Image (cartoon, rainbow, N blue to C red):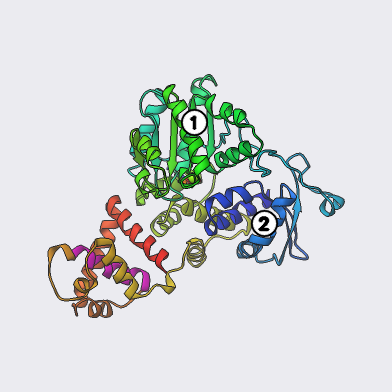
Amino acid sequence: MEHQELWKTVLGEIELQISRPNFLTWFKNSQLVEKNEKEGIALVALPNNFAKEWVKNRYHKIILGSLRNIDGSIKYVNYVVVSHNTPLKPSKTERKQKAPELTDEKSNLPITDLRVDSKTNLNPKYVFDSFVVGSSNELACAAINAVIENVGKKYNPLFIYGGVGLGKTHLLQAAGNAVHLKYEGKVRVLYVTSEKFINDVVWALRNKRAEDMKKKYRDVDMLIIDDIQFIGGKAATELEFFYTFNALYENNKQIIISSDRPPAAIPTLEERLRSRFEGGMIADVAYPDYEMRLAILKTKAQSLNANIDEKTLEYIATKVQKNIREVEGVLNKVLFYQQYKNNKIDQKKLDEIISETSQVSPKNITPAEIIKTVAEFYEISQQELTDRGRKQEIVEPRQVVMYLLREMLKLSYPNIGERLGKRDHTTVIHAYEKISKEINSNSVFNQKILLIKERLFKNT
Ligand code: ADP
Ligand code: MG
């Protein structure tokens, strides 16, 4: 049990450091199978040789770093192949020999999760019971519910977009599971990531098995494609998807699609596909506000039967704003410490966990970058922000700059005032308080600030 928990926490860390598709491909079926306390060796299992070599070569540093971060006693990591069919504990000989054990002959990648339903490809863990509905995902949830009630008839296609870790996959899969259950399997559901779709197309082309491919994707009543943005720009797959889409659409089959951005913002997407998407229903999932982050933390803690005090949850909800995945990551780590280290978590440890889980540390961001990014965001000149002008439309951007300089860089109030048109420090304090309040009470505004922060992290 301990291994499983530890590894889950480590995966939470790794997930934040590599791209989502890579994470899913390489880590979904990984496990921690052994931990030798005395020698400080952790043994990580991958489902086949190919995955083992790849992970070892590419991700060793990240794995070791994350493991050490969480369990200081670990000094080395070794890798071993354990396929789904072999027992968890590999024997000594198994550790040495072991030929590739391919579980997915089409793609040669063992990307099937044990818990995943082999027909629908859905993971039963994603259900609505554990999904918190709030202002940031209300619209998307309403649309999803309408689709569940009227498969293929109401919103078709349904296109859901939003940033990483905001619950798109959870929502899509929960919809699939709900439909599967509600109609007792009579409405055939198929969930795939666009990556899986691409793999299937490539495989079908290579093996001249286009018919199989067609059958698989067109013989369903509800096709769910997750992270469609990866399809854009790959001519053969896009074409195949277009045909699949049309075939389903014309037969009133339901299509649900997710993406990290709206159709208009996928630059490589072919025009006719884009206009098909735009012809359906488009809903976004936004960044969660404080209330929602707290609700999610409480739901999650409760479902884990975790004993964690309210104050700690509130503190996490205040500090961790980036996305839900990160909120969950912090919670998992906190629980891990509490449970396995027999530690009551103190403020210092809590802050440490929060800062190490946060994807980017803001230390290399400069005041000039903040001013530039905010100016670009609001489409005004930097000069306007930093001079003494009092134009109404500059008030908010300037207050945002003041807030960010204080919050991210911890500059003193007088110093901030000096940089922004030699303003008095009380003006800066007022701005800081005003923006802080706004962030906590207005989710649209909060989203705006998060977008600006995201740009800041990207630029540097
Ligand atoms: P995305 O697909 O948008 O990147 P995911 O669906 O993978 O995001 O969500 C990231 C994590 O956050 C998952 O563990 C998911 O269960 C959880 N999560 C996301 N949204 C919610 C929500 N509204 N309520 C509860 N958990 C959520
Ligand atoms: Mg996703």
Q: Which residue is drawn at 23% across and 64% down?
A: 397
Q: Position of residue 199 (x, y in %)?
A: 59, 42
Residue named by callout 2: 55
Q: Which residue is drawn at 18% across and 77% down?
A: 423
Would you say residue 405 sits in the magenta stretch?
yes
Dot 2 or dot 1, earlier in sequence: 2
Residue named by callout 1: 244
Q: Position of residue 386 (x, y in %)?
A: 21, 75
- Residue nearest the observer in this picture, 261 or 82: 261
Secondary structure character of the magenta stretch overall: helix
Apparent side of residue 391 relative to residue 116 in the rendered image (left or right): left
CA separation in Å, label 2 and label 1: 34 Å
The extreme right residue here reads 93
Q: Position of residue 364 (x, y in %)?
A: 43, 74
Chain part drawn in magenta: 395-409
Q: Is residue 365 visible?
A: yes
Apparent side of residue 241 relative to residue 292 in the rendered image (left or right): right
Amino acid carrying mark 2 in the image? Val
Q: In front of the other: label 2 or label 1?
A: 1
Helix, strand or loop at label 2? It is: helix
**Residue 390: assigned label:** none
